[in-house]
Amino acid sequence: MTESLVEKLDYEATFDCVQCGYCLPVCPTYIAFKKEKHSPRGRINLVKLAAEERISIDDMQEGIDLCLGCRACETVCPTNVRYGDILMSAVEVLKENKQMDIVEKAARTSSFKFALKNKRVLGLINRGIYAYQSSGMKKAVKMTGILGKSKKMDQMNRAMPDIILSRRITRNVNPFRRKRLSVGFFEGCIMDAFFANVNRLAVKIMQKNNIQVTNIPGQTCCGALQHHTGESEETLKLAMENIEAYEKYDFDYIVNTIGGCGATLKEYDKLFEPGTGWHERAKKFTGKVRDISQIMAMIDFDFNHEIKKNAVYQPSCHLENVQQVFEAPLDVIHQVPGLNYMEMNEKSLCCGSAGIYNILHFDESMQILDLKMENVKKSKPDLIITSNPGCHIQMKLGVEREGLADEIEVKHIVEIAAEACGVRGN
Amino acid sequence: MEHVVLKEFENIMGKRLLTEIDDRMSYGYDGSFGQYIPDCVAQVMSTEEVQRIMEIADWHEIPVCARGASTSLSGGPLPVRGGIVLDFSQWDTKLEIYPDDLIMKVSPGVRTGDIHKLAEAHNLMYPPDPSSSSICTIGGNLAENAGGPRGVKYGVTKDFVIGLEIVTADGKVLRTGGRTVKNVTGYDLTKLIVGSEGTLAVITEATLRLIPKPSDTRTAMIIFEDLYTAGKSISKILTSGVRPSKMEILDHNAINKVEDYAGLGLPREAVAIILVEVDGDPDVLVKELGIVRKALSEIGVENVQVASNKEEEARLWQVRKLVSPAVVSSGYTKISEDATVPLSRIPDMFRKIDEIKKKYNLNIVVFGHAGDGNLHPTINTDMRDPEEVDRVERAVEEIFNYAIELGGTLSGEHGIGTMKKAFLATEMGEEGVAFQQAIKRALDPKNILNPGKIFPEKGEKRLVLRND
Ligand SMILES: Cc1cc2nc3c(=O)[nH]c(=O)nc-3n(C[C@H](O)[C@H](O)[C@H](O)COP(=O)(O)OP(=O)(O)OC[C@H]3O[C@@H](n4cnc5c(N)ncnc54)[C@H](O)[C@@H]3O)c2cc1C
Ligand code: SF4
Ligand code: SF4
């Protein structure tokens, strides 16, 4: 048993932590819950102790469960502790250890295993949300199963974005006819269903700027949500399917509009043993993954529409801390005419959305959102720009909870760029 | 701990008394070594809470360990005998500045970095600047008498505290010092408590002294080809009439580690480099650097590079900042020492450490605060290899002993804690230890305040890096 726990948990990586505490001031859960066990330093220590069997697996559960996985701790760590790996190993072990409680299980099986992978079902969900949007029937949202049935979710329902029907985008383009830049477009699943419009705009912006965009068949969900909740066999399978699907083409980049998915794609190589063929293939794949903001930052935009707003930007944690994309979105934002960009206090602090954290740990998530909204209010913006669907919904929720829905708009960075260059959705 | 005692603590603290095993474990380590398990943790937020806890602890003879951000590198906050941990890190509620009096009043959990920021916002400065400023608490700084690069010109924590509120071992609240810089009424209790590592009293408030903020800084890098000259340069600069605000040294190994890590274009062949910062009026700074240059050329040192703008200056200091991360390679643990020697003996110390490095076949780099002789020989080791750890323990012992032999000290700023207590008598002599113990017994007769620190156990002679 000892051996296997030391192996299953990333015990090796815990030794990189020198317990200096540099990560404490950037950890949202430490700031919100005020206890060492909710800090990166505390969590790493708990995993180490569990591996050494000085505490039980159950004893590390609370600390690990309440981690957002935002990985802000990695960005500041002077010794480059691989916190993401430590966390994932702990989530896996915990999942094996415990029977999932009923609510969680329901949320996971209905929405993930089934819906996320199945484009047809996703389409249905999407249309369901569309029906909800147009008719105002609350039932339709509950159909998704993602939002659960709890009363608390009402607020979340209100934060749902304006959805348009997801239609096939560019599938008919011949990928072998090359233009200036050629990119494969990673649709994603949540994004596809919830943010079809953003995806469509992204594609149009790229096409307008002479980039050849291909939406290839055979791609599937990135596996992020499965990964975060400890279902790594499933993730591995999805990764292999995606790598295979993209290998058939010779793209310059593989582009996505979702910080979280992009991060998972970017780390596909970590799923395979170095030295193996699959690791090589994964490396090739990850080398091409780019966020839409990075592509947009390469474009010589011809922005001709003013957006007269005072805006703040809420980065996606995974875009920053895993993909290490910090400046590209700001490069785009700064180019928008009329837009007054304001740097928000503690901008990089997670908003508390974190995959399905806000569903599994609603109260804690709201505590973290409240911290974020304090900072938003200090800047007094009338626009919040986001770069990830999860954050987008969460920020809408935040605005809603503060009663500021009439004063503050929430928009994805792609929507902003589209507006500025006169690209429309439909 | 008996259930009734826990209940009594809980009556005071409510939900801020932590008793679950994951919480207890999480307050059982620091930036040094070892994992201990306190019986409970109290996240105190007021003097009254501390005072009531001390009364109960005194009555039941329960060990009490104060803890700030637990960045101590010497084992200071470790609950080695169990008991209750007083977590001060959340008590950051009081941060008041009185610019006209040049003072600040702070609660013990305020982060040093926040003190810096508030002072600067008023064009003032709180000089003590441990590298851990963004995390460590003022309470921890006071208890360890923390220093930092600016020590060479401005001094350390003890030079900037003029008054304290403390709670004694038997739960009495009293104030030491006051709001004035000059104060000779009675013994200087403030200085007695500062640096006492939580073993004489618990600090619940501090009054700090501020100075006007220097308007500008300039930085130069001096490159050396032999250690003897590097050592001589330190004294030469300090006696030239210019008082640098920072003066940091990196040895050959440190330079190369940083270069491997970050590729900043440092001179890899150099035996050492020294970074010198001067602060004050911009016109004066240019003159001061001229004086430094001239003094150095008198002893044949010509390789002096002055940063021409702020970016270059920032890049030079980046070098110093990167030493710590650069020396930690994956899977290894960093052991940083802080033996301090008289300025003229710095080259001897460097040479000795190089010898020790070879003798024990270890990965040691040396860097530190050249201006006050405070060196940080840092060893990178695999804590899972008992044989190697054994060699490290012997090497560190040799470093300690040599520092003392040179007329230096075991610790310049990190404190004694659990790590260096075996060597206390070597430096202070038996009488010195006995005198300190007499003070400890008088103020804490039941030995409940942070027991197991500073003073060696009977027969304890060796450095031990492991407790488990
Ligand atoms: C990366 C890094 C860099 C560092 N750089 C420096 C440096 O440049 N200079 C330097 O001097 N040190 C340095 N240190 C060491 C450490 O940061 C200092 O010793 C600091 O003062 C500890 O503060 P803390 O809040 O973390 O206290 P802790 O580590 O929690 O406690 C330190 C000691 O203070 C006592 N204590 C804490 N609060 C109170 C209180 N309210 N009343 C009574 N006793 C109390 C504890 O019992 C313990 O003995 C560094 C450490 C790290 C990890
Ligand atoms: S910053 Fe890195 S090394 Fe320091 S405590 Fe956090 S995880 Fe550990
Ligand atoms: S991933 Fe985010 S929430 Fe989790 S420990 Fe790191 S900083 Fe904290």
Image: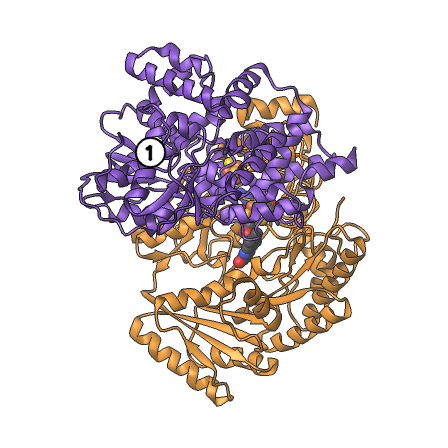
Chain colours: A purple, B orange
**Residue B125, how many percent across, how many down?**
37, 57
Question: In this orientation, which residue lies closer to the viewer: A394 or A375?
Answer: A394
- The quadrant of the picture occupied by the C terminus of chain A is top left
Q: Taking the image as drawn, is residue A228 in sight?
A: yes
Read off the residue under disc 1: A200
> Which quadrant of the view contains residue B328?
bottom right
Q: Residue visible at 39% across and 21% down?
A: A126
Q: Taking the image as drawn, is residue B145 in sight?
A: no
Question: In this orientation, which residue lies closer to the viewer: B227 or A386?
Answer: A386
Tell me: A135 left or right of B385.
Answer: left
**Residue A422, how many percent across, how many down?**
21, 39
Tell me: B93 left or right of A307.
Answer: right
Question: In this orientation, which residue lies closer to the viewer: B297 or A221?
Answer: A221
For badge 1, the amino acid type reads: Arg
Tell me: A89 left or right of A66.
Answer: right
> Which quadrant of the view contains residue A187?
top left
- The quadrant of the picture occupied by the N terminus of chain A is top right
**Residue B88, how many percent across, how many down?**
52, 39
**As drawn, B239 above or below A171:** below
**Residue A37, how many percent across, how many down?**
58, 34
Question: In this orientation, which residue lies closer to the viewer: A371 or A217?
Answer: A217
